Amino acid sequence: MKVYYDKDSNLDAIREKKITIIGYGSQGHAHAANLKDSGVNNINIALKEDSGSIEKAKSAGFDVLTIQDAAKDADLMMMATPDEIQSEIYDQFLDKNMKNNSALVFAHGLNIHFELIKPRDDLDVFMIAPKGPGHTVRSEYIKGGGVPSLVSVYQNKSGNALDLALAYGTGLGAGRSGMIETTFKEECETDLFGEQVVLCGGLTELITAGYETLVDAGYAPEMAYFECLHEVKLIVDLLYEGGIANMRYSISNTAEYGDYVSGKRVITNDTRKEMKAILRDIQTGKFVRDWMLECKVKQPNFKASRRISKDHQIEVVGKKLREMMPWIQKNKLVDTSKN
Ligand code: NAP
Ligand code: MG
């Protein structure tokens, strides 16, 4: 496996290029700010005319254009909009307007791998996919670090696509921690699996189920919140810093013994079987088909899930408890008025 760092890359490949970031959300705002701070000189943002993000991008000092106008001029366009609308954006605005021999760039491989977008032959098409949330791509960069990223070239019309991808990754700060060369298929399937099984789906269900078990048994919701949600970060910080043994070194022997005997009762052979089934649904395209169909009918299930989980007691109790810990709010990663 090839891993590239800043020393393997030259930012000059994109320094004077006209770069458009389409979308100014989680990834978009971070890409724009990091590239600018790295010395990329010509960045603008493309948004819909009625977009709620226009003011955010403008107050951060960026010019905002429509997607079709930006496309006519850009050397490189980063698709930083939600996955489910990318094919519509490509078909409506990019296919006929993108400059000949320019570059179309993705932060996730879904639309290319599952052929929702069939890019024009004359374009360079590549991916630089940060392995972390957009707000963290920004906050790590500010700290002098960077979020590791996956890089892959799908179409190399210019012959320079990898150099462009590595330069873009360096601008993002990814070259400080490593840019791993992969394929769109591998990035897409592992990314979907990771977020569904471990990082998002697995973790939130684990937290909620633990919380509900304690509250149902008569323990105070506040205690259950601290135990099952708040402390996750404290444990994850130790895992992040030095792996599983580093975390187990810090916890008590009692906690470590409980970890060995009870962890496997929570993640059972049935759970592992289900993980394999989820991976199969991702690989066969079933998951993406279901998600795109859900989007075609305006996301009723998705929106209801959001609404129901927002009202869960763990969220209500958590909000109250966090108000007593103002330092958590001080350096917030997410400020919805700005990013
Ligand atoms: P996001 O935050 O949901 O993107 C929202 C932005 O896209 C907003 O500025 C929104 O503008 C704009 N937008 C929405 N619909 C649009 C349209 N029809 N035309 C133009 N702009 C539109 O997206 P994201 O989560 O950053 O994801 C972007 C890409 O990065 C995806 O491919 C995703 O898989 C990938 N990725 C994301 C993360 C992450 O941390 N989120 C991590 C790795 C990779 P409005 O204000 O008008 O809605
Ligand atoms: Mg993802």
Image (cartoon, grey):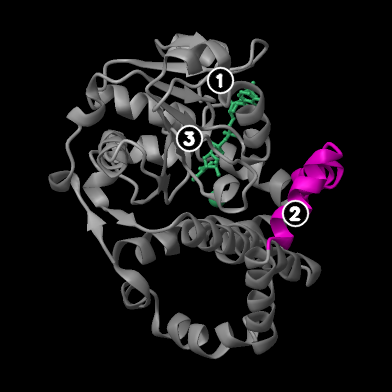
Residue 11's place in the image compared with 284, above or below, is above
Q: Residue at x 44, y 33 (%)?
A: 122
The N terminus is located in which quarter?
bottom left
Q: Quadrant of residue 262?
A: bottom right
Q: Amino acid at mark 1?
A: Ser
Q: Does the CB distance between marks 2 and 1 fall below 8 Å? A: no
* Residue hosting label 3: 27
Q: Does the CB distance between marks 1 and 3 fall below 8 Å? A: no
Task: Please state the horizontal and vertical placement of residue 57, each as a whole percent of the image.
Answer: 48, 15
* Residue hosting label 2: 289
How crowded pointer 2 is (Cα within 10 Å; few <14, some 14-19, many 20+) is rated as some
> Closest to the observer: 283 or 95?
95
Q: Residue at x 47, y 17 (%)?
A: 45
Badge 3 marks a residue whose secondary structure is: helix
Q: Is mark 2 within 8 Å of ligand 1?
A: no
Q: Amino acid at mark 2?
A: Arg
Residue 297's place in the image compared with 183, above or below, is above
